[in-house]
Amino acid sequence: MKHIDASYRDKVVLSNVSLSIYERDFIGIIGPNGGGKTTLLKIILGFLKPVRGKIAYTFDRSEIGYLPQGNQIDDRFPITVREVVASGLEKGLKIQKKFSAREKQRINEVLEKVGLTKLHRRPIGELSGGELQRTLLGRAIASSPRMLILDEPDTHVDNKFEMELYRLLRELNETMTILLVSHDLGTISPYIKSIACVNRSLHYHPSNEINEEQLKVYNCPIELITHGPVPHRVMKTHNP
Amino acid sequence: MEILRLLEYGFIQNAFAAALLMSITCGIIGTYIVSRRMVFISGGITHASFGGVGIGYFLGFPPLAGAAVFAVLAALTTENLTRKKVLRNDSIIAIMWSLGMALGIIFVYLTPGYAPNLMSFLFGSIITVTSTDLWFMFSLTVTVLLFFITLFKPILYISFDEQFARTRGIPVMLMNYLLIVLVALTIVLSIRIAGIILVLSILTIPQNIANIFTNRFGVIMVASVILGFVASMIGLAVSYYLDIPSGATIIFSLVIMYLAARVVKVLTFGKKYPSGKETVHEPAEYH
């Protein structure tokens, strides 16, 4: 994307943003609340048209998998884990057809990958926060996308699931590019390969290590705490 | 035996057919409305349609045709303004709701003489359903059935998560407009049976009864069709024997069935619901 401007009701949210995303990169998108992280994702996903600038894809946009913020999901909707994961295989408007044997096999593979085989018939209303996130992750990866976009997947989940999630993402990164919005640089820094600081403007940092001076230069005013090999900002209790 | 003899009457045959057709459309459309938390928007469309009834009386064309035009216009306007975020969704609905009622009252008042069948539009009358009404209902039922059978999966996915459905290339906006038009037409044709005041119950109570026992979208749909038809038959029979309004009796039957289902559930499973959180008992909100 080049020279992107985006605004909501005359309020400029992103200004002159340019970013090239390389294959199999794992970008952690960080920045203060209201800095434009989710807006950036919406532009990449095609939900929002920029007021200026260009965005070009080297593949079809349907090859992007998307995991929305958990609070966007109505967990009382009458749908099962399997149906949610299967929805990730839908492409375009198709007249009703049954899933092929290959599609069924893919759904089973994904359910196994995200550890939900035993819960596949369960309505989502009966899942814990972590199980629901795993279901949504399964939906996002069902079509084997080339790029995976995750919007704060670690909100409302426990530490155990958080670690499982990042291990799984590292594995997925072997075959797909990942863009991850997170408020917790400390947790994601061991897994990501690069950092995009978004606060109206965007600064790409081609490493998972970053210091306070660099964050200042990048206009990303967040604190960093150093413990362990990578300096990072801590927003919640966790084990280094 | 006496009940079977009743079926010889033409108006009872019409009522029977109308109940069956209404149960199918309302069972399907109601599940979509309730699952997607569109109950309030449906209330807005229902009441907005009264404007068309009033103009129909005033200008001398069939009030139901006027109701259909008003309902579809209200539905499309609400969908459009919500999408453009011109106003808050609940405010748009409230304006449509009261504007339709206000126009209806003004035009009925301005109509010279007596407005025949006005009460049947407000409270419904299944026994006055005509063959023409039945043809309209039959056409709508076939359309709704074909639409939901052929596009069940996209409808389910859009209803669950519109944004994700868009990432999968499903034409969400087109589908939303088509679905809201089907909702509006279903409401209008059900007005003949349950009336403007009561129609929302037929679109929500069977789904809530089904949801006590199941959390599956498709199962709730099928169960709602059956429950709606059973309640209509009970309501029709009771209203005939007690000589009371049919629409209100059908709704009353549904409420009794709902309470009975609750009791059965508690007696069978205790106070804990094995199907987990119920899905459709929250106050309605759209998107």
Image: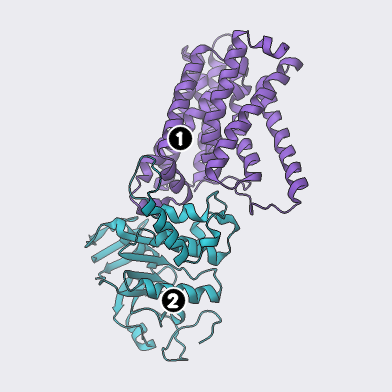
Chain colours: A cyan, B purple
Q: Is residue A77 visible?
A: yes
Pointer 2 local density, CA inside 10 Å: few below 14, some 14–19, many at least 20? few
| Residue B227 on image: x %, y % | 63, 32
Q: Which is more toward the observer, A140 or A53? A: A140
Q: Which is more toward the observer, B125 or A163? A: A163
Q: Is residue B76 visible?
A: no
Q: Amino acid at mark 1?
A: Ala
- Residue A7 as seen in the image, left or right of residue A111: left
Q: Which is more toward the observer, B194 or B157? A: B157
Quarter of the view holding residue B220: top right
The secondary structure type at the circle numbered 2 is helix
Q: Chain of mark 2?
A: A
Q: Amino acid at mark 2?
A: Arg
| Residue B49 on image: x %, y % | 51, 27
Quarter of the view holding residue B182: top left
Name the outermost residue toward the right. B267
Give the CA distance from mark 2 to mark 1: 47 Å
The secondary structure type at the circle numbered 1 is helix
- Residue B224 as seen in the image, left or right of residue B154: right
Q: For the N terminus of chain B, which image quadrant?
A: top right
Which residue bears the numbered disc 2? A167
Residue at 54% of width from left, 79% of height from top? A236
Name the outermost residue toward the front. A101
> Is B102 situated above or below B277?
above
| Residue A80 on image: x %, y % | 53, 53
Q: Which mark is residue B177?
A: none
| Residue A87 on image: x %, y % | 42, 52
Residue at 49% of width from left, 54% of height from top? A82
Which residue bears the numbered disc 1? B75
- Residue B202 as seen in the image, left or right of residue A68: right
